[in-house]
Image (cartoon, rainbow, N blue to C red):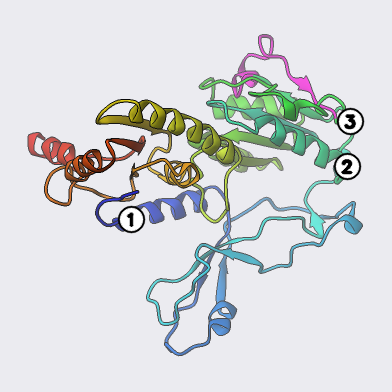
Amino acid sequence: MATFGAAPSSPPAVENYLNRMQHSGSFIMKSKPMNNPSTPVGSVLGAVEELQIPMLAGPTFPHPKPEDFDFMEPGEVILENVIVKTGAKDDPIGLTRAGPRERVLFKGEDTRIGILTCGGLCPGLNTVIQGIVCDSHFEYNVPEGNVLGIRGGFRGFSDPELWPPLVLTEKSVSNIHNLGGTILGSNRGGFEAPKVVDKMVEMQLDQLYCIGGDGTHAAAMLLTEEIRRRGLKIAVVGVPKTIDNDIMVIDRSFGFDTAVQEAVKAIKCARIEASACLHGIGIVKVMGRSCGYLAAHAALASRDVDICLIPEVEFDMEGPGGLIAHLRKLLRSQGYCVILVSEGTPIKAHQEAAAATG
């Protein structure tokens, strides 16, 4: 399997990520500058400063099930990169570790929760819904009937007659992990932050879980800003939905493993077709936007890909080290070729032509 060129650096992408995290109310950790290159790694991590973005404030309550958890300690962080180099100019980046806390902002017995799904379908949506419903009830004492499924995405708020909310209980969600899609339905659009917040107040929701992609999280941020403007105590929680696995720090996003498995099936079919004829070329295109994780993992899992093209790695089409020359070499040596392409992969020649024509 071949890749071409060198991976370009992308400081703007990192900067955009940090900006999104700051605006979304997440915690970002930055270390103090390291003046001594010989500083032990332990000392470097001990010097980490916590930059706290304003979060929900108010009285806290003891966790209702302390016997069930090992609570996260204050100051625990997950580093973006497990390798920390002493003397580096750039500060390490880390995020506050997720997990149960000893004190919580909402008293379970008095809490009402809303859950919605937006955008395209993704494997595991119903499992996430099931997890929120069951954990809120069994681990946080949220009463049965206090968890509502907002149907049809944000349109469930704007048009409740067409999309009436669905009461979710541990019994009603007990088998939904075996179903595809989402039991709440999904949609795009229908979002106006002030009207959605009005409806949340009318429904007496204390927490809203938004399961979706970039657009859903942008909407969740607007909701958070509107809620803060009004001084309300309502938590908006974004649950990333992407098969691309393009989320910092975590090992994999839900649905990614299934997407890899399905891509492997397509790759094997492409190999059979390509190898059945002289100089056959099988091309498989997978999702990924500007991230090549899905393509790379599918290529490694299948063992049938000859060329894998991903957005992170630039390549030339022409020339002795280009894609065309390597493709001809493969066709001469084995008689066929399987190419796997991630959807956001740029073609250098096309980019240069577009730049030249304005």
> Which residue was labeled with disc 1?
10
Q: Position of residue 179 (x, y in %)?
A: 71, 24
Q: Residues within 10 Å of mark 1 (few under 14, many from 20)?
A: few
Which callout, 2 or 3, points to the residue nearer the camera? 2
How far apart are the alpha carbons under marks 2 and 3? 10 Å
Q: Residue at x 58, y 41 (%)?
A: 257
Circle nearer the N terminus (3, 1): 1
Q: Residue at x 24, y 38 (%)?
A: 331
Which residue is situated farthest in the top direction here? Answer: 162
310, 129: nearer the viewer: 310
Residue type pointed to by label 2:
Phe
Q: Would you identify the image quadrant in which residue 94 lies?
A: bottom right
Q: Is residue 242 visible to the viewer in this orientation of the structure?
A: no
Question: For residue 166: magenta?
Answer: yes
How far apart are the alpha carbons under marks 3 and 1? 48 Å
User: In the figure, is residue 106 to the left or right of 52?
Assistant: right
> Which residue was labeled with disc 2?
138
Q: Give the number of the disc on residue 174.
A: none
Q: Residues within 10 Å of mark 2 (few under 14, many from 20)?
A: few
Residue type pointed to by label 1:
Ser
Circle nearer the N terminus (2, 3): 2
